[in-house]
Image (cartoon, coloured by chain):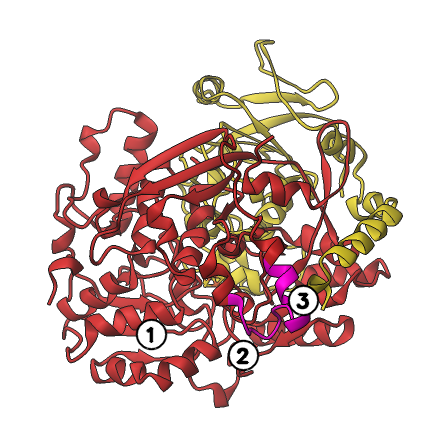
Amino acid sequence: MKPFTQLDGLVCAMDRANVDTDAIIPKQFLKSIKRSGFGPNLFDEWRYLDHGEPGMDNSQRPLNPDFELNLPRNQGAQVLLARDNFGCGSSREHAPWAIEDFGFRALIAPSFADIFFNNCFKNGLLPIVQPAAVVDQLFREAASEGYRLKIDLPAQTITTPSGEQFSFEITEHRKHCLLNGLDEIGLTLAHRDEIAAFEARRKAEQPWLFA
Amino acid sequence: MAKTLYDKLWQSHVVREEADGTCLIYIDRHLVHEVTSPQAFEGLKLAGRQPWRKTSVVATADHNTPTNEWDKGIQDPISRLQVETLDANIKEFGALAYFPFKDQRQGIVHVVGPENGATLPGMTVVCGDSHTSTHGAFAALAHGIGTSEVEHVLATQTLVAKKSKSMLVRVDGQLGFGVTAKDVALAIIGKIGTAGGTGYAIEFGGDAIRSLSMEGRMTLCNMAIEGGARAGMVAVDDKTIDYLQGRPFSPNAEQWDAAVAYWRTLVSDEGAEFDTVVTLRAEEIEPQVTWGTSPEQVLGISGKVPNPAAESDPVKKGSYERALQYMGLTADTPLAQIAIDKVFIGSCTNSRIEDLRAAASVVKGKKKAASVKQVLIVPGSGLVKAQAEAEGLHQIFIEAGFEWREPGCSMCLAMNADRLSPGERCASTSNRNFEGRQGQGGRTHLVSPEMAAAAAIAGHFVDVRTFA
Ligand code: SF4
């Protein structure tokens, strides 16, 4: 996993609430048994004018010129500004895989769906929750072309071009993993004895769980 | 101190806790399906790791499997490869049980787990699938996880998690005739919103919930995720215990009494405090129909498609306009006047035997409306299918002009060949009405099995309470 420390990124604003994972990456692309290559199909149904299927040459497909990701001003964006409940719906990790593969590193919204939020951290993506009023302000400011935000994970701050700062919360555990790009399984297995002891106790108390 | 059911489930699974509240939670049951597991098994292989406890794994193939012409196998080569990859992974890594394509006990993972007794009270149950919340109906702590977490559970038998806040959703009173668990679920989401449960584990309580069957409770907990909650759960009572008696993976005779004694403790203590309490009156819940592209965009059948002009919140107004455009609906149209093209009765929300019985009771002796192109009845599992056939339900459906299919996810998410064409309108018993969910450009209205069956006969939505 790519570590995340600081970012000075172009902002792509997507002004709609309840963006679901079916929209982020439609189901036909979930048939892949790979973990990479989902970026070209991020928001497939909104982004292209034709129907996408796995294996198509996406560079030849007609783009929807009005869709946020296709606007010239948003090319190269690394920060996705979104509305409430972003990432709702299925648990598909293909959603953060596609977002990361496309080139985003951070997302800002008033709220994220729970499983999507968790999945982001496993893939070097930083989802940031901000109060609705702050998100409103960022949307207003992001109306001007070339709008960028500085995101500092160690300091837990977002800085606007005018120098205004907002702080955000993150658990120490997640921060540590993101900053260092750590494999969580390795970290957990350092506690293997504790897990084994817990399991043995559980087996003694509720043997029917281990049938 | 008085504890909630969620407190008890959480505390009994904490292996260790860090200073910031991050915990390692022990996982008892790991359900696996073909879509979200290949990359996890691959990760395990690449790291040279073995599953920690393979007997915690129960697997089945459901999303990509076809629901007709099984003799032809899986036609789509990419779907076939995904299912074969699961076959190979289970063969290599092992499982307590695997119900592959065409197995008599194959089916939707959230139907298969409970009916085999693989979901038990007091367990933590995870699956790379958001509707894992279904299993909370058994007073289990059950939720969906991503593929990285699937790998983490395989490798360590634990999950890294923080405790959620607790919410009690209490539905008091008695549900009216024709009002089902699905309607309760949709009414709750209509009330709290699709983000209303974010950060919470919800316990459903109250007379109306206690009176629901286990099937109904599964329907309700299934939809907890659509309300944004991490998990949904219902306390143990006699119904829970009766349901589990004699299932293949239920505790054996020697362990049964001890298990039941423990399960009886899996209720919220008198006076336990919740972070949030939401109450609904059962009598006020009508049969529900969604009109938009989010499950919170829902109304009782006597309602009308809302008018965005009447909405003051600009974000909401925008979503309403977008939803009406996508759904091809005009503001102020009575829901009962909306004509449908297709009907889907199935999915992990409503494909259990009780759902099929309910649909059949509405359909019996009637015929599908000529204007309705297709009605799919997709049982949740091979066992449900066999039971329905033993009761003759399939005959009722076939005589009505419906299609009686093989089990699987089918048109709930249209990963196999069952799907809507652009612009087609569907009365569906599934759980998501998102854009494109049932096929690109398809328009989904979420309803109960009774409401879907009645719509299939009438050709448009009708109030099942007055439908004869
Ligand atoms: S039936 Fe639908 S919601 Fe349920 S597991 Fe299958 S695809 Fe997911």
Ligand 1 closer than 8 Å to the CB at disc 3? no
Observer-nearest of B8 and B63: B8
Q: CA distance from mark 2 to mark 1?
A: 18 Å
What is the span of residues highlighted in magenta in the rendered image?
Answer: B244-260
State which chain disc 2 sits on: B
The picture's colour for chain A is yellow
Amino acid type of the residue tagged 2 in the rendering: Arg
Ligand 1 closer than 8 Å to the CB at disc 2? no
The picture's colour for chain B is red
Residue B149 versus residue B382 in the image, above or below: above
Residue B271 versus residue B420 in the image, above or below: above
- Looking at the rendered image, the disc whose residue lies closer to the viewer, 2 or 1, is 2
Residue drawn 20% across the image and 69% down it: B456
Q: Is B364 on the left or on the right of B182, as rendered?
A: left
Under tag 2, what secondary structure? loop
Pointer 3 residue? B255
**In the rendered image, residues at marks 1 and 3 fall on the same chain:** yes
Give the percent coordinates (x, y) of residue B49. 84, 60
- Looking at the rendered image, the disc whose residue lies closer to the viewer, 3 or 2, is 3
Residue drawn 49% across the image and 38% down it: A86
Give the percent coordinates (x, y) of residue B431. 39, 55
Observer-nearest of B4 and A155: B4
**Residue A83 in view here:** yes
Give the percent coordinates (x, y) of residue A126. 65, 33
